[in-house]
Amino acid sequence: MEATRTNTTVSLPDYMLADLNAEARRKGITVSRLIEDSLEETLYQPNADTLAAIEEARSGAEMEVLTHEQIENFEAFVASL
């Protein structure tokens, strides 16, 4: 679900706006999207538990191999949604 959007005005130095425009072009996104992504990254840092879970998932330390039956059960569950 998309969040409600509100327009706002921000005063920035000319050099910063030029850099934002250049970076947005390089990434193929709008300046608004670039600013929003940057704010998300800055404001909503994961907590220590989440960071630990991310690291665990990346390491594969607790990985288990699913059986064919488990996969079928999961697929049936998803199909029932």
Image (cartoon, grey):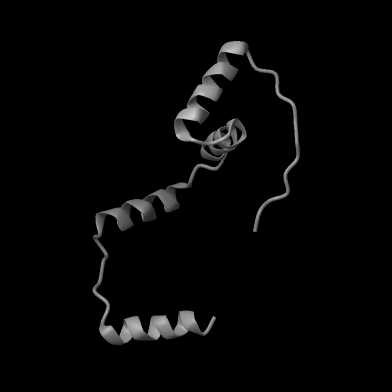
Quadrant of the image containing the C terminus: bottom right
Place of residue 37 in the rendered image (x, y in percent of width and height, measured from the top left): 54, 38
| Image-based side of 65 in relation to 48, left or right | left
- Relative to 49, is 24 above or below? above
- Relative to 43, is 69 above or below? below
Q: Nearer the viewer, residue 41 or 56?
A: 41
Q: Residue at x 58, y 37 (%)?
A: 33
**Total numbered badges shown on the rendered structure:** 0
Q: Residue at x 55, y 24 (%)?
A: 21
Q: Residue at x 32, y 58 (%)?
A: 57
- Relative to 60, is 71 above or below? below
Quadrant of the image containing the N terminus: bottom right
Residue extending furthest top? Answer: 14
- Relative to 47, is 68 above or below? below
Place of residue 51 in the rendered image (x, y in percent of width and height, measured from the top left): 40, 49
Place of residue 30 in the rendered image (x, y in percent of width and height, measured from the top left): 58, 34
| Image-based side of 65 in relation to 35, left or right | left
